Amino acid sequence: MNEKPKPLPFDDLTFPTDDNPDAALEEWQKKKIRRGLKAADEGRFASPDRIKVIVAKFVPNG
C-alpha cells in the first residue's frame, strides 16, 4: 500500500492556526503573502539579472 497522503490546502500550510495570540501580526503576514503572490502572478517577481545574483549567492557553480 503506497498511497500518497492528500496535500494540505495552501492556507493550512502557509498561515498559522487560530491559536496564534497575535492576530494583528498574523493579518499583516497574510496580507504580505497575498500581495507577493498577486505580484508574482502578474509577472512582477524578479528580473533575470536579480535571479542570477541570487543563484550565484546560494548555488556553487550555478
Image: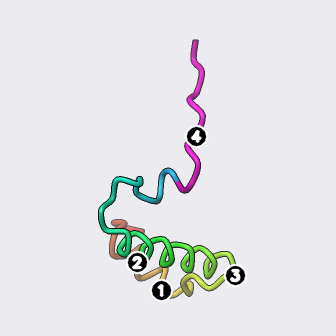
Q: Which mark is residue 54?
A: 2
Are discs 1 and 2 less than 8 Å apart at CB?
A: yes
Q: Quadrant of residue 58?
A: bottom left
Compared across the picture, whether 28 is left or right of 60 comes to right
Are discs 2 and 4 less than 8 Å apart at CB?
A: no
Spot the residue most to the right. Answer: 42
Cα distance in 3D space between marks 2 and 4? 29 Å
Identify residue for label 3.
42
Q: What secondary structure characterizes most of the magenta part?
A: loop
The kind of secondary structure element at disc 3 is loop
Seen at 58% across and 48% down, the residue is 9
Camera-nearest label, 2 or 4? 4
The kind of secondary structure element at disc 1 is helix
- The residue stretch that appears in magenta: 1-11
Counting from the top left corner in percent of width and height, residue 38 is at 63, 78
Of residues 45 and 7, the one drawn nearer to the viewer in this rendering: 7
The kind of secondary structure element at disc 4 is loop
Are discs 1 and 3 less than 8 Å apart at CB?
A: no
Q: Which mark is residue 50?
A: 1
